[in-house]
């Protein structure tokens, strides 16, 4: 279900007041090896599970697109330049998490036009029985996030890998207790102060998304401070 992503969304202060989050089961951090994190766009992996990656100290990344469509009418950068910038930002973010040696698999899909079947086919050889596969939730509300979530689900079903889905835009359009969200499947990852600091530093490695590219409306920040606030909590959430 693609939900329109508009307005300011649910403020982080509202999420902070929701007491149910404290009672969600903790995800045991016992992966059989480095997880595979599958990101529709560069920065999804960081917003969703950078704290987990920093905590585990190992992870590989499947970068589905280069995020070249974040500012389609930019007067500052072409799509090709944006793709280059965002690839470099991901590399820097991984470095800041202590994961400079992470393997990055580039799937080369078009931002805004993902071929779901091709993504599933590309993920299958990267997965194996029991390997953790973390990706955006299938009903996150953004077409690319949903397509990648479905593709990863298919790849996990055929390999026996363990799928863990993280919400990104659902924190924007949903509200506490929202019936459209599977809160009963929520698992919580509590982050140490050092993991939180590493995540903050990794988010800051994406100036093309957190700051305007220029003064024009088409160059506005995609992730202004009120959105970033939702990703600088002391815990992360995945759906099992
Ligand atoms: Zn995204």
Image (cartoon, helix red, strand yellow):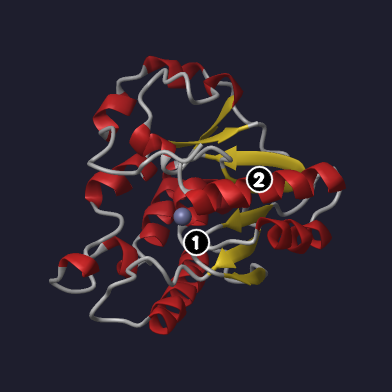
**Relative to 16, 93 lies left or right:** right
The image quadrant that residue 202 belongs to is: bottom left
Q: Secondary structure at mark 2?
A: helix
The residue located at (29%, 46%) in the rendering is: 227
Residue drawn at (65%, 39%) of the image: 164
Contact check, label 2 and label 1, Cβ < 8 Å: no
Locate residue 30 relative to residue 14 in the image: left or right.
right
Q: Would you identify the image quadrant in which residue 240 lies? A: top right
* Residue 167 position within the rendered picture, expressed as x and y whole percent measured from the top left: 49, 39
Q: Is residue 39 above or below residue 153?
A: below
Residue 41 shows which numbered tag?
1
135 vs 173, nearest the viewer = 173
Query: Please, what secondary structure does the residue beneath circle 1 have?
Result: loop
C-alpha separation, residue under disc 2 versus residue under disc 1: 15 Å
Residue underneath mark 2: 150
N-terminal-most mark, 2 or 1: 1
């Amino acid at each position: 279900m693609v939900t329109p992503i508009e307005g300011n969304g649910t403020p982080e202060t509202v999420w902070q007041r929701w007491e149910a989050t404290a009672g969600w089961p903790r995800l045991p951090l016992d992966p059989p090896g480095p997880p595979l994190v599958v990101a529709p766009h560069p920065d999804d992996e960081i917003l969703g599970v950078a704290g987990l990656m920093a905590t585990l100290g190992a992870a590989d990344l499947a970068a589905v697109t280069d995020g070249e469509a974040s500012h389609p009418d930019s007067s500052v950068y072409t799509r090709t330049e944006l793709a280059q910038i965002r690839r470099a930002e991901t590399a820097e973010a991984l470095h800041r998490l202590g994961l400079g040696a992470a393997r990055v698999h580039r799937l080369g899909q078009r931002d805004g036009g993902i071929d779901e079947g091709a993504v599933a086919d590309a993920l299958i050889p990267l997965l194996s029985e029991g390997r953790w596969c973390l990706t955006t939730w299938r009903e996150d509300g953004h077409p690319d996030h949903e397509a990648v979530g479905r593709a990863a689900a298919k790849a996990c079903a055929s390999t026996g890998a363990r799928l863990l889905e993280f919400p990104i835009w659902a924190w924007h359009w949903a509200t506490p207790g929202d019936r459209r969200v599977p809160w009963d499947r929520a698992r919580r990852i509590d982050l140490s102060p050092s993991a939180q600091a590493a995540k903050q530093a990794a988010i800051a490695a994406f100036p093309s998304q957190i700051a305007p590219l220029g003064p024009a409306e088409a160059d506005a920040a995609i992730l202004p401070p009120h959105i970033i606030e939702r990703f600088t909590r002391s815990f992360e959430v995945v759906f099992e």
